[in-house]
Amino acid sequence: MFLKLVPDSTAIQFTRMRVVALMVSAALIVGSFVALFTIGLNFGIDFRGGVTIEVVDGEPIDEGAVREAVGALGLGDISVQGIQDFAGTEPAVVVFVERQEATDPQPNEDGEIDLDVANENAQQEASALVQQTLRTLLGDDVEFRKIDVVGPTVSGELIQKGAIAVVLAITMMLIYIWLRFEWQFSLGAIVALVHDVIITLGMFAVTRLEFNLAIIAAILTIVGYSMNDTVVVYDRVRENLRKFKKKELSDLLDLSINDTLSRTVMTSVTTLLALASLAVFGGEVLRGFTLAMIWGIVIGTYSSIFVASPFLLATGVKRDWSKQAAPATP
């Protein structure tokens, strides 16, 4: 006998909760905008630029000693964070140094000063200096497992391309839904997607989790997951609109959501179980991505039920699908 998280037949009246859901969503969106404009996102090295060095040693690493040694180099703001590998046995620390700018840029052969090249060179010099300092402090047998050096030019391009990727994904989803269903469904799906993205960004602003390229990948994955969940519900709505031509739209939406509820819950729970394993055993590198995905699964499931589906009530979609052709007059 298989465990059933949701009975085969449910009759939950979701549309009656739409006013409360609207108030909750509005509060979350407003709060997200306030957090984004007041607190801002905690951009990682991918977007801010700087130097990140992950150093591994066979012995426990004194984070305080590393922080003091690197801080004495005069490279600006630094951070030192202790991490462990997947097995939790190998001590390591990640050292982040803020983006460096050339203090005395030299002209090239043509007598011109290229600030971008000069700043990139300053970044590389800072990376080499930090590595040498760590070798002196911890010994020559230390291992630098990861070294990332991102300059201001690259970080600016990454911000632009990341934003374009998200906007393009949502636009293509809009076109897909518009072609597969009707414009009312398309608008409802896009409202749900924008709802999910804004609230996810607000969550990152409030929690101060590092926002990097992995999070952009997580947001794109969330967009795809949320859209898939919404399409499943919309497909059942379309079937029921053709089947029950005189049923009230609110009742028909409740019926459609309940018909797909078991699938929605099982998909969300199994996905969350996999993500929970990544959150526990995936280490620091995957933690931000995993937490973003967990949040996205929750908010995406919520929006499919309480945002995308009730939105059809405001657009009068039933009139487009359920009108019967008038009988011909003799």
Image: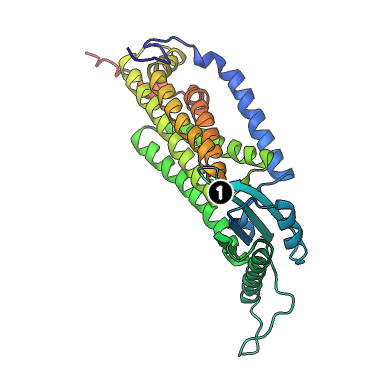
Seen at 35% across and 38% down, the residue is: 179
**Residue 142 percent location from the top left of the image:** 59, 61
Quadrant where the C terminus sits is top left
Going by the image, does 269 lie left or right of 55? left
Q: Is residue 257 left or right of residue 117?
A: left
- Locate residue 267: give its quadrant: top left
Q: In the depicted view, which residue is nearer to us: 184 or 284?
A: 284
30 relative to 142 in the view: left or right = right
Q: Depth check: give the residue in front, 213 or 234.
A: 213
Q: Residue furthest left?
A: 330
Residue that label 1 marks: 90
Q: Quadrant of the N terminus?
A: top left
Q: Residue at horizontal 60%, vertical 24%? A: 22
Task: Please tell me whether mark 1 sits on a helix, a strand or a loop.
Answer: loop
- Amino acid type, label 1: Glu
Query: Is any part of residue 323 visible from this angle?
Result: no
Quick check: can you spot residue 15? yes
Which percent across, then down, holds residue 236?
Answer: 35, 22
